[in-house]
Structure formats: C-alpha cells, structure tokens
Image: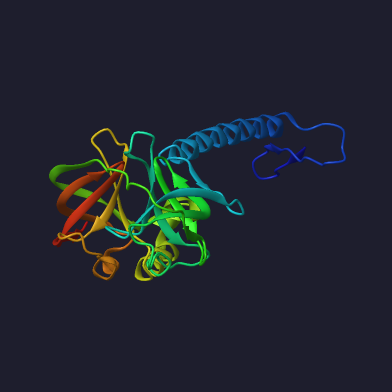
Amino acid sequence: MAKDERTGSEDEFYVGYAGGMPPATARFLRRIIVLSIGAAVVCGAAFAGLANRFPAKVFEFGTQREFVGWVRAEPVPSLVVPGPNGRSASHYLLAHGGTKFGAHELIRGFEKSLVRARGTLIYRGDQTMLDITPGALERAGEGLEPISVSEDLGRHRFVGEIVDSKCYFGVMNPATGKTHRGCAARCISSGTPPILLARDRNGNPLHLLLVGARGEAVNGAVLPYVAESVALTGRVLRLDHLLILRADLSSIERL
C-alpha cells in the first residue's frame, strides 16, 4: 500500500513476484475477464449468424470429374447431362479452368453435341459450374438431346448485387470493397457469366443468370454496376433448375 500525503487515501500496488494480489486489483481483473468472455461469445455468435446467410460453397480444386452430356452455347456455355427419362437431369455452367475467362472458345465446334467432359466442380447451394481446360471435351457418339423444362415466370423487379458466377459459386469467399469489385469486374469483362444475387420474400438467396432482353450477353453493359447494390427489372425464365433474368438494362439503378 502507498499513502497519498495530500488526501490521506491509500493506493494499492501489485508486484508480480510478491505473494498475493491486492483485493481491489483482483476484483477489477475478474470484471475484465468476465466482460471479455461475454464479448467473445457475442462476437462469435454474430459471425456464425453472418456465415449462415450464405449457402455452403465448394471448389473441388485438384479433383477431376467426368460427365457425359450435351453442350449448349445459349444463354451461356453449359453442359446438360441427360437423365434416364430423356429429360435433363443436371445443368452445369461451363468456365475456363485456371483463368478468369468464359468457356466460349473451349466449346467452339461442340455446340449441340454429345461429349465427354472432364473438369473441376464449383458449386454453392444448388448452383453448379464445371471448370474445364483446353482438350477437356471429346465427342461421345450419338444420342438424343435431353428435353429441358422451361417456364416463363413473368416480369419482376429485384434488388441485389451483380457478381461473377465463378468466384461466387466457390472459387473465392464473399468479399467487399475495391478488391471484390475489381475481381468481379475482371471476371465478367473476360466472359464469365454474371449473376444477380438477390433474395426472395423469406430472405432465401436467389441466383439469377443475367442476360439481355433478347437473351444476349450483357457482360460489358453491366460492368459499371458490378458488386454494388442495384435494382433492376426483367422477365424471369426457368430453364431446368436455372433462373434466367432477361433484364431491361435501362431499368438498372444504384441504391
């Protein structure tokens, strides 16, 4: 203890190598420890809740899988795997492996053909992409192209964020800021299909493949709005399990 000559009060000194800790210091440290533990629990719960907002993502890096299906170029390069009933069972978007480019060049000459494809799966929730490289496609004989189920779901207005499908599906974690915007813009400008990430009335994520009003590619037109909160209107089509937004580009507005 040390006594203040002006006030007559006594202050505690704690010396680490001494026998015990003064009572007031011990009480203070106990409060700090309790508050720190409580803050850690609250922060952990908050981060866990934030993580649960995003469906699980997977990039099977280093693992090659093989599929037999039909190559389609529209609305974006994709591989449609037939089911036993003659209808399409799976619909995979195609990407250029190891790059930020789309797969348009890789499917040239294989459009509407039955092929054997080797690649790496990238998927988030029910959205799946096959990352392929040059030479990954080879003809697999003849067959009947599977019948896809399509449905016009009408015109809707959405609020969401335009992201590049390859990174969002699993190659990169969700991010924010200039780095996120720059990466997404680079991928979309190089041909990766853009996705509008929105939410339904229950807060569930909606992944809408973004094309123009006539089904044309809009990669260049949406670049100024990539990775920003936007609102836009368009007609929604369902093709198998894909949701396609034929957007009215004049309706895009920043929020």
The reply to whether residue 175 is visible in this rendering is no
Question: In this rendering, would 66 be left or right of 244?
Answer: right
Residue 9 on image: x %, y %: 67, 37
Residue 206 versus residue 177 in the image, above or below: above
Q: Which of 198 and 122 is in front in this view?
A: 122
From the viewer's perspective, is 28 left or right of 239? right
Residue 16 percent across, percent down from the top left = 83, 41
Res. 112 in view = yes
The image quarter containing residue 199 is top left
Q: Is residue 181 above or below residue 2?
A: below
**What is the x, y in percent for residue 193?**
34, 60
Nearest the viewer among 152 and 17 is: 152
Q: Nearer the viewer, residue 209 or 66?
A: 66
Q: Residue 15 lies in what quarter of the image?
A: top right
- Residue at position x 29%, y 67% from top? 219
**Which image quadrant for residue 185?**
bottom left
Residue at image coords 20%, 59%: 215
118, 128: nearer the viewer: 118
Where's the N terminus, which quadrant?
A: top right
**231 versus 189 height, above or below:** above
Please state, as top left, top right, bottom left or bottom right, where the C terminus lies in the image.
bottom left
- Residue 42 image offset from top left, x and y in percent: 50, 34
